[in-house]
Image: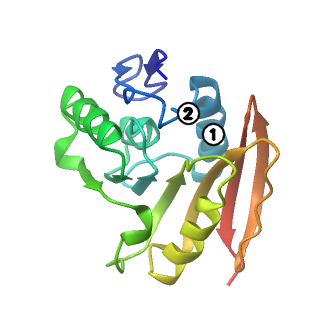
């Protein structure tokens, strides 16, 4: 699925992004990304210095958007070879290598974190429950701490219930449902 993916705001505003070839990934639509980042900005203020992860990363558009807006570092994780090629190409085109870490693996195979991240962005395949399983595991492995914001994109009809998390906001955009989650304990 290719569309004209672009960075919405920040230092790389308007720059085009490559989408993975084929139809195994579904890049987050610009309108959905715009809504998500407006929800995040209203809660975070800005992205300056944040440590971010873009999981089930696809093109890497979510993480690159965060970097464009001032995030210090982003971990990109996807197991699809086409997605990894697109992410690496986008990072190279934006010269974002010093602030990026790309891992070609399953989100579920991430080990224990050195420290919690500030923001975790997950855009797993819809209707699989993969995002909820990943959030639960990442919390147990220390990636998601008390102060971490978690964004989970699901299909519009999907609800999210993860032990130890509550929804700060849920918003439907097109076919997507955006969930902003916080740890409760």
Q: Which residue is drawn at the image coordinates 57% and 24% (left, top)?
A: 30
Crowding around mark 1 (Cα neighbors within 10 Å: few <14, some 14 to 19, many 20+) is many
Query: Could you say where residue 171 lies in the image, as x and y percent from the top left?
Result: 78, 42
In the displayed structure, would residue 132 be above or below residue 137?
above
Q: Which residue is drawn at the image coordinates 70% and 80% (left, top)?
A: 164
**How many numbered circles does the render carry?**
2
Nearer the observer, disc 1 or disc 2? 2
Observer-nearest of 88 and 39: 88
Where, by quadrant of the figure, is residue 82 drawn? top left
Query: Could you say where residue 49 lies in the image, as x and y percent from the top left?
Result: 36, 54
Q: What element carries label 1?
A: helix
In the displayed structure, would residue 140 be above or below residue 49?
below
Tell me the residue that label 1 is attached to. 36
Query: Could you say where residue 4 lies in the image, as x and y percent from the top left?
Result: 46, 15
Observer-nearest of 178 and 105: 105
Q: Distance between the residues labelled 1 and 2?
A: 10 Å
Q: Which residue is drawn at the image coordinates 58% and 27% (left, top)?
A: 29
Q: Do the residues labelled 1 and 2 touch (CB within 8 Å)?
A: yes
Query: Does 29 sit left or right of 18 as displayed?
Result: right
Mark number for residue 28?
2
Where, by quadrant of the figure, is residue 61 drawn? top left
Q: Earlier in the sequence, mark 1 or mark 2?
A: 2
Crowding around mark 2 (Cα neighbors within 10 Å: few <14, some 14 to 19, many 20+) is many
Query: Could you say where residue 48 lies in the image, as x and y percent from the top left?
Result: 40, 48
Q: Is mark 2 on a helix, strand or loop?
A: loop
């Amino acid at each position: 699925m290719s569309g004209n993916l672009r960075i919405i705001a920040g230092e790389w505003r308007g720059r085009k992004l490559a989408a993975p070839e084929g139809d195994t990934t579904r890049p987050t639509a610009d309108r959905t990304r715009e809504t998500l980042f407006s929800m995040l900005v209203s809660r975070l203020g800005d992205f300056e210095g944040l440590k971010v992860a873009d999981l089930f990363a696809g093109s890497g558009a979510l993480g690159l958007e965060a970097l464009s807006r001032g995030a210090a570092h982003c971990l990109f994780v996807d197991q699809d070879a086409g997605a990894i090629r697109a992410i690496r190409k986008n990072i190279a085109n934006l010269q974002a290598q010093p602030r990026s870490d790309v891992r070609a693996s399953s989100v579920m195979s991430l080990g224990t974190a050195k420290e919690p991240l500030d923001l975790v962005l997950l855009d797993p395949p819809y209707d699989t429950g993969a995002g909820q399983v990943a959030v639960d595991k990442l919390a147990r492995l220390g990636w998601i701490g008390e102060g971490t914001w978690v964004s989970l994109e699901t299909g519009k009809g999907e609800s999210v219930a993860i032990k130890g998390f509550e929804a700060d906001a849920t918003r439907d955009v097109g076919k997507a449902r955006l969930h902003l989650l916080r740890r409760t304990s």
